[in-house]
Image (spheres, grey):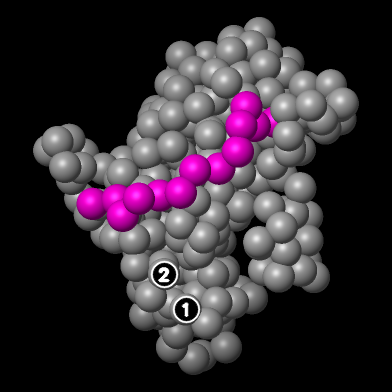
Amino acid sequence: MAELDGLFVGDLVRFRNVFVRSDDPREAISGRDFLQPQTLSALMARFRPQFAAADQRGLASIWVNQYFIRLFPPAISAALLLGQRMPLRIEQLAIIVDAEGLPLAFKLPGGCEPLESPGNPFERFAHLLDDNLQPLIQALCAHSGISAKVLWSNAGNYFEAWLGQLKRRTQQPQLLVEGERLLSTALRPDGSRNPLYAPIRYVEVEHADGRVRPWRQRRLCCIRYLLPDVALCPNCPRLQSPPAE
């Protein structure tokens, strides 16, 4: 999306071509096939072959994080900064993956549509939450046995992290309010639980240098510790204090 080129510069330039036209000549996996157990298994095996015999819940957790890291920056930025909805229904996409089994680009079935004054943040992000994340998370849970809460927590972690990036880079912070509301609203309009609610907390703690600063801590562990020799992340709620910087 050319409108976001000014945002995706420097170390963020890799997000410029995450979304491509359906006629992109590169080989891709159809969205329907992407959700199949055999496809997910093959992709995760390519991602970390050393964990083929390990707990697949931990592997699913770290693999899906790479999906979020790739998808969220342009999708969230377009919704908040440009007021545009991308056609993200996963069954209608085709996903280009790299040699490690990670999403490289998404072939879209059509162009973006303007968001017409959505009444709440769940309407603004329905194309992301309901059309894309929900079926992906459901497929991963069925395949690996991982809890949906863990995967939604992972999604919330990266959603919140990208909002932080946008706050530091935009001159119009008021455009980010709907993203913040998405993470701070406990219930959806229909009364069901918001799976992205409050994924992160900031705790004032004394760090290794003796100074008191806020520690960005997840509310739910990503369970990557289930994998052999994989340490807890620096934001893990299982930690009693932040690791030394």
Give the vertical position of 102 relative to 214 (above or below): above
116 in the magenta segment? yes
Residue at numbered disc 2: 175
Q: Position of residue 53 (x, y in %)?
A: 69, 17
Q: In the rendered view of the protein, which quadrant contains the C terminus?
A: bottom right
Give the vertical position of 7 relative to 39 (above or below): below
Question: Residue at the location (61% across, 32% down)?
Answer: 110
- The three-letter code of the residue at mark 2 reads Leu
The answer to whether the residues at label 1 and label 2 have Cβ atoms under 8 Å apart is yes
The residues colored magenta run: 107-119
For residue 203, side relative to residue 59 (left or right): left
Residue at numbered disc 1: 172
Q: Which residue lies furthest to the left in this view?
A: 191
Badge 2 element: helix
- The three-letter code of the residue at mark 1 reads Gln
Question: Residue at the location (47% across, 78% down)?
Answer: 172
- The CA span between labels 1 and 2 is 6 Å
Q: How many marks?
A: 2
